[in-house]
Image (cartoon, rainbow, N blue to C red):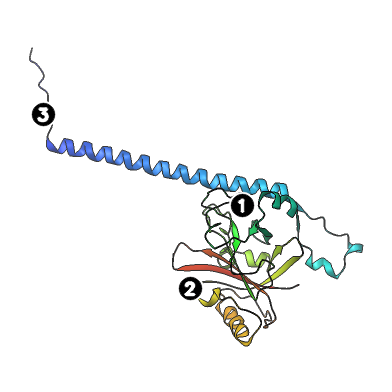
């Protein structure tokens, strides 16, 4: 009976073992990151779902014999701003985009960084909060009010905004709303397109002027979709919804003019 001799490990065996350990390490790290991202997304979505459930109710449509010319400017939802202010006093409005699942509180911070990765309840989360440019007035009466929101991969925040160009959102509705404690504003979409982060899309104006009229004409011509013959003049109030594209040098924007 002969003894079995142990096979002596060759250098290649050690190399393969190291490669296997590294591969397992990479897999575990990737899995950890995926789980972390999922939990972040879920945490943000759960918070906003709870806020919407608390503060938003669907508006009962008027009966045919009760309808009047103001019905056109009655939004599909009603918002309890007192309840929202009890959580965050920076709230200035609620955005509701018809044709998309976009319905969120809107805040104005001391700069454009604070709410970038803080939720409405001011906890850290990549989703952040929908917010207007800190240089805009909070009454939405500027010539061009800039509204920022993240393009989340799960479709939350402004994650579905690009469906105005790549889906059927515009066919479903040409309008979006900004509800405020004082008044509810309806906007008609006149342009949707990709633009550079430093383009003149983000220009703020002190008031109506020939320069603003020229800007309106240019913004309309930028549109990647046909929005028809929407009249624009220097007295209009524009809202620009802006989100990232996955390319750090560009943004996707949807612009609407206020109707009331």
Q: Position of residue 185 (x, y in %)?
A: 73, 67
Badge 1, how many Cα within 10 Å: few under 14, some, many 20+?
many
Q: Can you give x and y, in whole percent of width and height, for residue 231 in the image? A: 69, 81
19 or 50, which lies in front? Answer: 50
> Secondary structure under badge 2?
loop
Quadrant of residue 140 within the rendered picture: bottom right
Q: Nearer the viewer, residue 201 or 67?
A: 201
**Circle 3 crowding by C-alpha within 10 Å: few under 14, some 14–19, many from 20:** few
Query: Which residue is found at the position 63% from the left and 49% from the top?
Result: 48
In the image as oriented, which residue stretches furthest toward the front? 110
Q: Secondary structure at mark 3?
A: loop
Q: Tell me the CA gap for discs 2 and 1.
A: 27 Å
42 or 106: nearer the viewer: 106
Q: Residue under circle 2?
A: 198
| 23 vs 52: above or below | above
Residue occupying image coordinates x 64% and y 85%: 209
Could you say whether the residue bearing mark 1 is in a helix, strand or loop?
loop
Considering every residue shown, the one lying at the far left of the view is: 2
Q: CA distance from mark 2 to mark 3?
A: 64 Å
Q: Earlier in the sequence, mark 1 or mark 3?
A: 3
Reading the chain from its start, which is encountered first: label 2 or label 1?
1
Provide the residue designation for mark 1.
120
CB atoms of marks 1 and 3 within 8 Å: no
Residue for point 61% across, 81% down: 216
Mark closest to the chain's N terminus, 2 or 3: 3
Residue ID at (73%, 50%): 83
Residue 13 placed where, x, y %? 17, 35
| Circle 3 residue | 8
- When asked about the image quadrant of residue 207, the answer is bottom right
Q: CA distance from mark 1 to mark 3?
A: 63 Å
> Which residue is situated farthest in the bottom direction here?
210
The quarter in which the C terminus is drawn is bottom right
């Amino acid at each position: 009976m002969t003894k079995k001799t142990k096979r002596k490990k060759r250098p290649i065996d050690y190399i393969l073992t190291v490669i296997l350990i590294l591969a397992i390490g990479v897999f575990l790290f990737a899995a950890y990151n995926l789980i972390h991202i999922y939990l972040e997304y879920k945490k943000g979505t759960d918070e906003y779902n709870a806020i919407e459930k608390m503060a938003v109710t669907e508006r009962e449509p008027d009966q045919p014999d009760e309808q009047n010319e103001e019905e056109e400017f009655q939004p599909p939802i009603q918002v309890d701003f007192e309840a929202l202010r009890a959580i965050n006093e920076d709230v200035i409005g609620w955005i509701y985009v018809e044709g998309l699942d976009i319905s969120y509180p809107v805040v104005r911070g001391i700069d454009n960084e604070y709410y970038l990765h803080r939720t409405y309840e001011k906890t850290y989360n990549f989703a952040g909060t929908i917010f207007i440019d800190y240089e805009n007035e909070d009454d939405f009466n500027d010539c061009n009010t800039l509204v920022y929101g993240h393009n989340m991969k799960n479709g939350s925040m402004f994650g579905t905004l690009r469906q105005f160009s790549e889906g059927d959102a515009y066919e479903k509705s040409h309008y979006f709303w900004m509800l405020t404690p004082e008044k509810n504003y309806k906007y008609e979409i006149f342009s949707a397109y990709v633009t550079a982060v430093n383009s003149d899309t983000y220009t703020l104006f002190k008031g109506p002027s020939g320069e603003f009229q020229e800007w309106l004409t240019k913004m309309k011509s930028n549109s990647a979709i046909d929005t028809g013959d929407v009249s624009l003049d220097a007295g209009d109030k524009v809202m620009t919804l802006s989100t990232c594209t996955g390319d750090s040098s560009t943004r996707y924007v949807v612009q609407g003019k206020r109707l009331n």
